Image: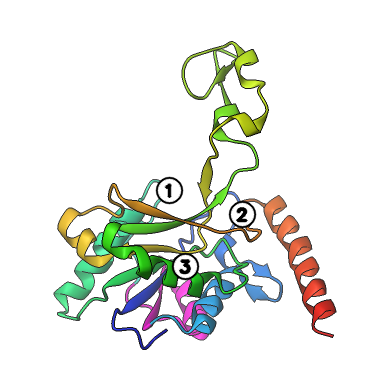
Amino acid sequence: MKNSKLKIWAVVPARSGSKSVKNKNIKNFDGLPLLAHTINSAKFSNSFERIFLLTDSKKYAKIGKKFGAEIPFIRPKKISHDKSTDNELYMYFINFFRQKKIKLPSYIAHLSPTVPLRLNKVIEKGIRFFLKNKKKNSSMRSVSEMSQPSYKTMRIINNKLCSIIKKDFDLNKLNKPRQSYTKTYIPNGLIDILSTKFLIENKKTHGKSVIPYITNQFFLDIDTQSDFELAKIMIKKIKYKSEKYNK
């Protein structure tokens, strides 16, 4: 896929300031720092002209470089705190290369480091899917169908359960079978593709025409220690199945 006329760079954003699990992005997972799994997936896909780790930590940068990622800069603190947005990071990234007069790629692939399991060539398939549909869409996001639609979720107002859709406390309306609701989807971080041109012209990460790349693989976005434990169990099962079918 590297031979495609359209150049694609992979970007793995990895802040060091996780509060849920200290140093989450470099915590050991199946024998490797967590972020290394995503870098390896990017390399093994053979899909990208360049692979970057965008981090605010020199320690993380050293680890990322060891596994084959480029470190173009150490992220400034002003775009590395809890409320920093992806859009701030991407505009900084783009301006960094433009100032150095380095030609940017047509597209940037965002790969989340907290989603270490990328199975069944999900990266390669996602890129092919996007390239087939890019003329009608500004970007792509990989999503998974939710087991329970968003319409059945609730919030708490004044210590009472309330519909997520509007301020309605009649929960009987939420008791219909899930099949009667429109399907809803959640972004899974496996691979998002952004248009460099759109970013430059609009100063926004996504436009109003974002194509969904619906994946059916198991995914777990690791945020807490319990997520780590569940992911460890899942990777053991995946390895067992792989060994079983390859005998």
Amino acid type, mark 2: Val
Residue 131 belongs to the span the image colors magenta: no
Q: Which mark is residue 157?
A: none
Task: Specify whether residue 78 is in view.
Answer: no
Which element is circle 3 on? helix
- State the extent of the magenta-drawn residues as a range: 49-73
Measured along the vertical axis of the image, is residue 5 above or below residue 35? Answer: below
* Residue at image coords 66%, 59%: 218
Crowdedness near tag 1: few (<14), some (14–19) or many (≥20) residues, C-alpha within 10 Å: few
Residue at image point 61% right, 58% down = 216
Q: Position of residue 130 (x, y in %)?
A: 39, 66
Point out the frontmost of discs 2 and 3: 3
Q: Give the residue pinned by disc 1.
A: 82
Camera-side residue of 99 and 133: 133
- Name the residue at 32% across, 74% down: 73
Q: Is residue 140 above or below residue 183?
A: below
Report the Cα–Cα distance between label 2 and label 3: 30 Å
Picture coordinates of residue 45 (x, y %)? 51, 80
Find disc 2 in the rendering and name its residue. Answer: 21
Residue type, mark 3 in image: Gly
Q: Residue at x 49, y 62 (%)?
A: 112
Q: Residues within 10 Å of mark 2 (few under 14, many from 20)?
A: some
Q: Where the C terminus falls, by quadrant?
A: bottom right
